[in-house]
Structures are given as structure tokens and as C-alpha cells.
């Protein structure tokens, strides 16, 4: 059941006026889902919900993300999210495309299709592209440059296609770099973020997500016409 930022209840019917409850969907992979967090309340979606509440934004958050998902798996998530009539989508994707050696063009194309569908359904979209996997402790030092380069190539392709399809990009490159300096930001599997890692990620995402949420609930005069 989705959790409402204001009351931690099931969502009210969607509308996009000033008094409407905004439906926010979190799509993507294990990071979007919160794998590695000690408790679901410490995952990205729950932490952003707390940010909405603190900022007095009437919102409800639902996570559609699936652990181990690649960009090609977004299509099913988009169907579920649009059926729920979301007003804002946060898409965190790319890590598994890297680990599964999905071709860059294929991964970017799948992301672009997902963003286009979400935008076509009337939702604003924030995309967080592939992280730099070279910071993962298990990557041998001699392969770090190769992994860093591959991550950057995918991230750039995702950024370009996401913006072209009308999404806002929240690149967490600086945030991810902090993981290389603090092992406590990783969970016990030494791949997914820990609760502390998710706190850092949510803090970095919050300004962009909040800005887009306010843009949905308080559209500009141009957007109202």
C-alpha cells in the first residue's frame, strides 16, 4: 500500500490542482527499491516521503521498482505506474545494465521509451542515471578505470536521451564518489547502499524531486493554458 506524506494513509484521488494529493512513483532497479537498507522506511521512496512531509507537500509515494531490473524492464513498471495515474516519476536505473553488459544504445533507448510513455501520460519525470560502479569495493583496482569509463559512457547516453524526452536529470556523480571514501555507505553485500548510503542519496535527490513536485501542484501560467 502506498504511504501518504501527510497522513501515512492510502492516497486520495489524484488531481493536479493546488489542493490535490500528488502521486509520486519510484521506478527502476535495486537502488530505487531500497535493497540493502536495514528497513523499508530507510529506502529512497520512504525518505523522500519524509521530505515531502517536512516541506508541507501533500504527496503519496509508491515504489514500482524491482530489484535487479535493467532499463528494458522499465516498460512493465511504467504500465503499473501510469495505471496508478502518477503525477511525478523518479526513475533510478543503469547499474544492472552495466553489470549485465547491456549495450549502451539499447539501455538508453529503453530509458527513452519509458520517459516518453511517462511524459505522454502527463507525469513529470526525474531520471537518476547509472552510478559509477568503480566505487564498489569488489571491483579490482586494475579494472576501476575501465568500469569508471563504462559507467560514464552509459550515464552520458542516458542523460542525453532523458533530457530529449522531457525529463529532468538528477546526476548523483558527486554523491556516489563519497561511497569510495566511506565503506559504511555500503550494505553487507558490499554492492548496494546501506541505510546510511540511502540517506545520502535521498538528500541529494530531494531538491530536484521537491522542485518538480511543486511544479506539478503549482503549474506556471503557461502550463495551465
Image (tube, rainbow, N blue to C red):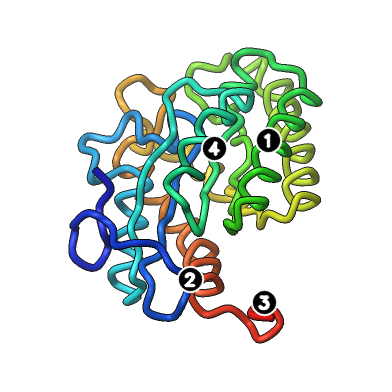
Judging by the rendered image, the residue that carries numbered circle 4 is: 78
Judging by the rendered image, the residue that carries numbered circle 2 is: 16
195 vs 67, left or right, is left
Depicted 137 relative to depicted 223: above or below: above
Distance between the alpha carbons at the discs numbered 2 and 1: 25 Å
Judging by the rendered image, the residue that carries numbered circle 1 is: 111
128 vs 187, left or right, is right
Q: Are there few (<14), some (14-19), or many (20+) residues within 10 Å of tag 3?
A: few
Distance between the alpha carbons at the discs numbered 4 and 3: 23 Å
Q: Are there few (<14), some (14-19), or many (20+) residues within 10 Å of tag 1?
A: many
Indicate the secondary structure of the residue bearing disc 2.
loop
Asked if marks 4 and 3 touch (Cβ < 8 Å), the reply is no
Depicted 52 relative to depicted 181: above or below: below
Does any portion of residue 180 appear in the rendered image?
no
Depicted 165 relative to depicted 220: above or below: above
Does any portion of residue 185 appear in the rendered image?
yes
Distance between the alpha carbons at the discs numbered 4 and 2: 20 Å
Front residue of this view, candidates 31 and 168: 168
Distance between the alpha carbons at the discs numbered 4 and 1: 11 Å
Judging by the rendered image, the residue that carries numbered circle 3 is: 223
Q: Of callouts 4 and 3, which one flags the residue occurring earlier in the amino acid sequence? A: 4
Query: Which residue occupies 18% across, 65% down?
Result: 7
Amino acid at each position: 500500500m502506498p504511504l501518504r506524506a501527510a497522513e501515512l494513509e492510502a492516497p486520495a484521488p489524484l488531481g493536479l490542482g493546488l489542493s490535490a494529493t500528488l502521486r509520486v512513483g519510484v521506478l527502476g532497479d535495486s537502488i530505487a527499491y531500497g535493497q540493502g537498507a536495514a528497513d523499508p522506511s530507510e529506502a529512497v521512496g520512504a525518505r523522500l516521503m519524509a521530505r515531502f512531509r517536512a516541506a508541507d507537500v501533500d504527496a503519496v509515494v509508491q515504489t514500482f521498482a524491482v530489484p535487479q531490473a535493467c532499463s528494458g524492464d522499465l516498460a512493465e513498471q511504467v504500465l503499473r505506474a501510469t495505471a496508478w495515474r502518477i503525477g511525478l516519476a523518479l526513475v533510478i536505473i543503469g547499474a544492472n545494465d552495466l553489470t549485465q553488459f547491456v549495450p549502451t544504445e539499447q539501455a538508453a533507448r529503453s530509458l527513452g521509451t519509458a520517459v516518453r510513455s511517462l511524459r505522454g501520460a502527463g507525469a513529470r519525470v526525474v531520471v537518476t542515471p547509472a552510478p559509477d560502479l568503480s566505487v564498489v569495493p569488489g571491483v579490482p583496482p586494475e579494472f576501476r578505470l575501465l568500469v569508471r569509463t563504462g559507467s560514464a559512457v552509459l550515464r552520458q547516453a542516458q542523460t542525453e536521451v532523458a533530457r530529449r524526452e522531457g525529463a529532468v536529470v538528477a546526476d548523483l556523480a558527486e554523491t556516489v564518489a563519497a561511497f569510495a571514501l566511506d565503506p559504511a555507505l555500503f550494505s553487507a553485500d558490499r554492492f548496494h547502499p546501506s541505510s546510511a548510503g540511502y540517506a545520502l542519496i535521498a538528500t541529494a535527490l530531494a531538491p530536484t524531486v521537491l522542485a518538480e513536485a511543486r511544479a506539478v501542484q503549482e503549474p506556471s501560467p503557461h502550463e495551465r493554458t
